[in-house]
Image (tube, coloured by chain):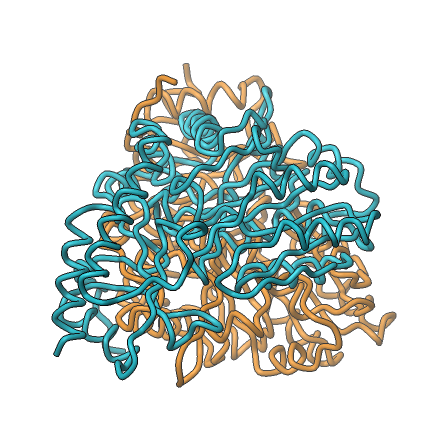
Chain colours: A orange, B cyan
Amino acid sequence: MNIESFTPPRRTLMGPGPSDISPAVLQAQSRPIVGHLDPLFIKMMDEIKLLLQYAFQTENPHTFAVSAPGSAGMETCFVNLVEPGDKVVVCINGVFGQRMLENVERCGGEAVVVEDEWGQAVSVDKVAAALEQHSDAKFVAFVHAETSTGVASDAQALCALAKRHGCLTIVDSVTSLGGIPLKVDEWGIDAIYSGSQKCLSCVPGISPVSFSPAAVEKLKARKSKVQSWFLDQTLVMGYWSGEQKRSYHHTAPVTALYALHESLLQLYKEGLENAWARHAAMHQELKAGLDKLGLTLTVDEAIRLPQLNLIAIPEGLDDAAVRKQLLEDYNLEIGAGLGKFAGKAWRIGLMGYAARKENIALCLAALAKVIQQ
Amino acid sequence: MNIESFTPPRRTLMGPGPSDISPAVLQAQSRPIVGHLDPLFIKMMDEIKLLLQYAFQTENPHTFAVSAPGSAGMETCFVNLVEPGDKVVVCINGVFGQRMLENVERCGGEAVVVEDEWGQAVSVDKVAAALEQHSDAKFVAFVHAETSTGVASDAQALCALAKRHGCLTIVDSVTSLGGIPLKVDEWGIDAIYSGSQKCLSCVPGISPVSFSPAAVEKLKARKSKVQSWFLDQTLVMGYWSGEQKRSYHHTAPVTALYALHESLLQLYKEGLENAWARHAAMHQELKAGLDKLGLTLTVDEAIRLPQLNLIAIPEGLDDAAVRKQLLEDYNLEIGAGLGKFAGKAWRIGLMGYAARKENIALCLAALAKVIQQ
């Protein structure tokens, strides 16, 4: 075999994730490895919990990081909380709502699907109607920020509605955490997961998760074992929690957690409100430039995510060829459309460390060159 | 909150994993991030597959890395292959055999347990007897190198036996891969998983996995969906394989895979046989030094793992105090005993990059100072 060490070029990542990583986070990741039960490492994990509580705006003691990507964070919420036969209202307005449905079904839950068009927010009215009709529903599950469509749904209203019907909420915040307002305790979210590689600008592969006391109670009252050993929170928490000795569950991804610690610390130092404001401001800057290029955003302003912008691909342009040229000539990655938007839209991410003026300037200049050829 | 960046000291890791990481691997991990669908990254993933095929000594096309730790690799094998009602002979001679049993039960499989004492190898005779008695068994599952006890079992004999009874084999090679001879195709292993953080000396958090064509056939013939969406191989392989376009499944842990690529490349350059010989030689060097200190290995020579050495803790010594002093005064981590060996044995790992003369010299010198006080 003729294989050499992998030496990637410096790309600018403005797709739907992974996003650009700051030098400080990459550097943190390459510090010397310590054991996953080292007292210094355990202390760092405790700090990660505090920093995650801040990022999620929660006091949930059950707040930690799953040792796997956001999809595993999603699965963590469903397999631990949904028992066979539990009825779950699942809101679908894009790829990730669909994935929630897959999870519900694979846990043996009974799904009540509330569908909205791709590019629209989850309809609070439709969810209300579903809850009226299914008074035995135990959960409402929805995606706060749909990565496939660039749409924000009203998490606060959906959670308030779910509470009025006695339901627990399971919320996907993979793309929202750190990018737009998200207040777990104030909004009454019961189970939430996110990803490391979006607005946290950390390396991919880690999924922050938080469970409310009510969710923990539901978990503790389970009649059957959690179907996944790896994601079983009753076991994992022996490692992430406890005043006494931490017990071994699995070997934590030590260096990825160094990176998460550093990225969360940077978010804390910047301040959540400032981070949200920065994403909003950079979105405006991008939009102004796109307007000048005659490119239009596909999502209505009221429900548009500042950190993930869907751009309608103008007629006559070759989607893949444009992205290929941006990558090859400018080392710039933008995202393809997903699902119903494949070939019809590009996704330009302004997430975390990528939400900077220099990235926007590059992106607009490169796009201008490539599409005006 | 008063939280600073995490700046760990340089530890020498001689526990049961994570093991020492070479500077080249740590450096590879901190290279600039690229997208998980970037053509350069896809090419690197293809190289990882080739390098893993070499490490596993297999031509299985279904060879790749699970985006999560070894425990998730274990779960990948069980949830994909074992269907509800399938009978599985599970061999238990330590912690990880026990974990296999948990997995079988959580998939709805029917376990036939073959137990051997901790510190003993899996008895081929007992497995033969179990297979005679349960002619409808579909799988034999066992741990090649038990990390909790430092014992090697005869994977070749167990696989040959399983084949004679028409069973597929599921093999844990978390601690064996790269450290002792392991030949997936020659021995007829059907499903195997490992970990990145043992003898591969890569960062923790990734689990190499390989399925034989017979295992893939069993997967494809499933009547029910795989209960885990995240680990469902029928979906994951759309990302890791295929001549055509790779389809998005989850966001791969990009930088951890850089590290895996580099660590596998180093193993390839050293050569498997040389790596096995180095582990054996370093074990002899450690043993000679332990003999001089009057410390004894707990495992019989014939079944002893060179890369993971269980040392009986001499009477009168305080297990935790010794390990604490090694860590604090010498930045040296050795492992505690697990399960039945807690408080009774230390585990000294000589894995991958940790299997070097300088580490052994430090370990012996530090142990001498601490235990002879």
Query: In the depicted view, which residue is nearer to us: A234 or A156?
Result: A234
Residue A288 appears in view: no
Residue A355 appears in view: yes
Left or right of residue A287: residue B167: right
- Residue B281 location, x and y as percent? 27, 42
- Residue B371 location, x and y as percent? 18, 74
- Residue A96 location, x and y as percent? 63, 50
Left or right of residue B369: residue A352: right
Which residue does the image show at 76% across and 40% down from the upper left? B165
Left or right of residue A137: residue B162: left
Quadrant of the rendering where the N terminus of chain A is positioned: top left
| Farthest residue, direction top | A373
Query: In the depicted view, which residue is nearer to us: B363 or A278?
Result: B363
The image quarter containing residue A271 is bottom left
Which residue does the image show at 70% across and 75% down from the upper left? A161
Q: Is residue A306 above or below residue A266?
A: above
Which residue does the image show at 46% across and 21% down from the upper left? A322
Which residue does the image show at 36% across and 70% down from the upper left? B345
The image quarter containing residue B91 is bottom right
Left or right of residue B223: residue A228: left
Q: Is residue A152 above or below residue B338?
A: above
Q: Is residue A50 above or below residue A338?
A: below
- Residue B120 location, x and y as percent? 51, 60
